[in-house]
Amino acid sequence: QQKNNVPSTVGTKVQSESSKNIILWKHAKATIACFICQDNDERIYQITRDSIASSKRKEERGYLSFLQCMIAWSGWYKLPWSYCSSLSDIRRLLNTARIGLRRPLTKIEELLLEMACADAELSNGGFVENSSRQYTEVLENVS
């Protein structure tokens, strides 16, 4: 009987590559969903719920976290944060979007997140006085 001389790590590498491909595929599908969800409340709710759940599990999703946060915030231009049920979820999404990119924010990304933060403070349980200050900072940064 001849022993198999294949190192035991080969199966692990194949499994690891397969897991990475599955994650990449899920991220691609989620990204596409972000661009086709306009005027579909159920899709926007689903994107928001998925983003909150991923942030609670501390999944690294890179730019997808930022994109999903923007959708949850704007609801594609309906009411700010209308798809989030709590201020803690909103703050979690904002934090995940900021650190999820794992790179410095561009100027426009920074401005969008600052406006989203200001809108969050107008939500139930937020600090309205912080919102006014944050909006002023955004206007100053734009000019």
Image (cartoon, grey):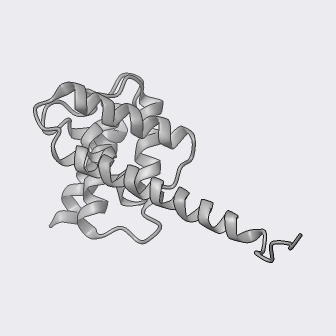
Q: Is residue 9 left or right of residue 44?
A: right
Foreground: 33 or 51?
33
Question: Looking at the picture, does residue 37 appear above or below residue 24?
Answer: above
Q: Residue reaching furthest front?
A: 1
Q: Kindly tell me whether residue 38 is visible in this rendering.
A: yes
Which residue is at 31% across, 49% downward?
29
Q: Is residue 2 left or right of residue 65?
A: right
- The residue lying at 54 percent from left, 38 percent from top is 56
Residue 46 lies in quadrant: top left
Residue at 15% from the left image edge and 43% from the top image edge: 36
User: In which quadrant is the N terminus drawn?
Assistant: bottom right
In front of the other: 14 or 94: 14
Residue 114 left/right relative to 58? left
Residue 82, quarter of the rendered image:
top left
Above or below, 131 against 35 in this view is above
* Quarter of image, res 79: top left
Q: Position of residue 84 (x, y in %)?
A: 34, 28
Residue 90 appears anywhere in the view: no
Q: Nearer the viewer, residue 41 or 122?
A: 41
Q: List x then y, in percent, for residue 9.
A: 74, 70
- At x 78%, y 68%, the residue is 8
- Quadrant of the rendering where the C terminus is positioned: bottom left
Instruction: Pick out the residue farthest to the bottom.
Output: 5
The image shows residue 37 at horizontal and vertical percentages of 17, 38
Depth check, front residue: 137 or 69: 69
